[in-house]
Image (tube, rainbow, N blue to C red):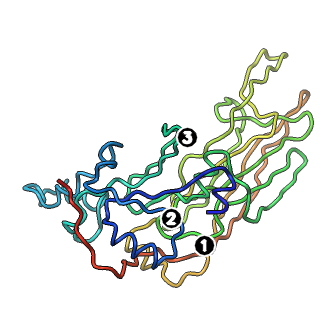
Amino acid sequence: MKEIQAKGLGLVAVSYDPVETLAAFSKQRSITFPLLSDAGSSTIKRYGILNPVTEEAFGANKDDPAVKADIKMYVSEVNPNRIMIGMAFPGTFMLDRKGRVTSRFFEDFYIERNTVSSLMVKLGRSDKAVAATKVSSSHLDLTTYSSDSSIAAGNRISLVLDITPGPGIHVYAPGAAGYKPVALTITPQEYVRALPAKFSASQTYYFKPLKERVPVFQKPFQLVQEIVLDGTLKTQAALRGTKTLTLNGTLQYQACNDKECFNPVEVPLTWTLDMRPTIFQRPNAPVVAPATR
């Protein structure tokens, strides 16, 4: 909370759960930010994020294979409970001081969630609080770090590469035909899914002898690679007892100056994260079914 507030932000969680359940959970987990009970899911409905699949689980089509697949994806891998009716699709909204939504972040699978630190990276407000690795070559300087120092099954985190080309050097950006554009390849491994990488805006370089215009990076730029650790119950069981997760990758690029182009380069990179369990602890207070009508 202190880190979030230091960035000028606040935090509140809105849930369809009754006050008694939220109070017990807040005490149990030592939560210091507000947990708001959305009676009748009225706020959830106004934001357009009511999860209708929970009702389908108890409707006439509950045995339809397509409905069963939706339940597994959006509600629960195990048997759903009627108490789930009224819940929201999980996600995060960013609001300004006037209450206007400025950003929103949602996932498909109910158990996959962006970490707060990863959201800060997406918003350009990361403070690099975790350890960083610095690499230098004859063409560029590279600082890389992960948004989080630890990860749990279902977490969606960011690997960040801050790259500074050397004086008079440019590296080719995605979309540069005939050259080796900068790219990050994550070594495939079980349970880990790499999403498409995102780059800062590139510049256009004009090579006069060939009358050629190509996208390049001449100024410091950032590459953000999002990683999702699978959150299924099967994966959680397989990872139980695992202490660390090591991610390996390779940064590829081709650098040039105004007179010559150099051979493509590959830079090996490694990130090691602590593993922590996914928390499914239920509150000690009796669960009271929320009003949904």
Numbered circle sitting on residue 117: none
Q: Which mark is residue 245?
A: 1
Dot 1: what SS?
A: strand
Q: Nearer the viewer, residue 130 or 103?
A: 103
Q: Is residue 208 above or below residue 111?
A: above
Residue for point 52% across, 76% down: 30
In three-dimensional space, the C-alpha distance between marks 3 and 2, rounded to whole angstroms, equals 31 Å
Dot 2 falls on a residue whose secondary structure is strand
Q: Amino acid at mark 1?
A: Leu
* Residue type beneath disc 2: Leu
Mark 3 residue type: Asp
Compare marks 2 and 1 and give the one earlier in the sequence. Answer: 2
Rendering coords of residue 75 (x, y %) = 29, 61
* Residue ID at (46%, 77%): 27
Task: Point out the tag, 3 or 2, that comes first from the N-terminus.
Answer: 3
Q: Position of residue 210 (x, y in %)?
A: 80, 17
Numbered badge on residue 96: 3
Q: CA distance from mark 3 to mark 1?
A: 36 Å
What residue is shown with label 2? 229
Judged left or right of residue 209, residue 13 is left
Q: Is residue 16 left or right of residue 293?
A: right
Location of residue 73 (image quadrant): bottom left
- Asked if the residue under mark 1 is in contact with the one under mark 2, i.e. CB atoms within 8 Å, the reply is yes
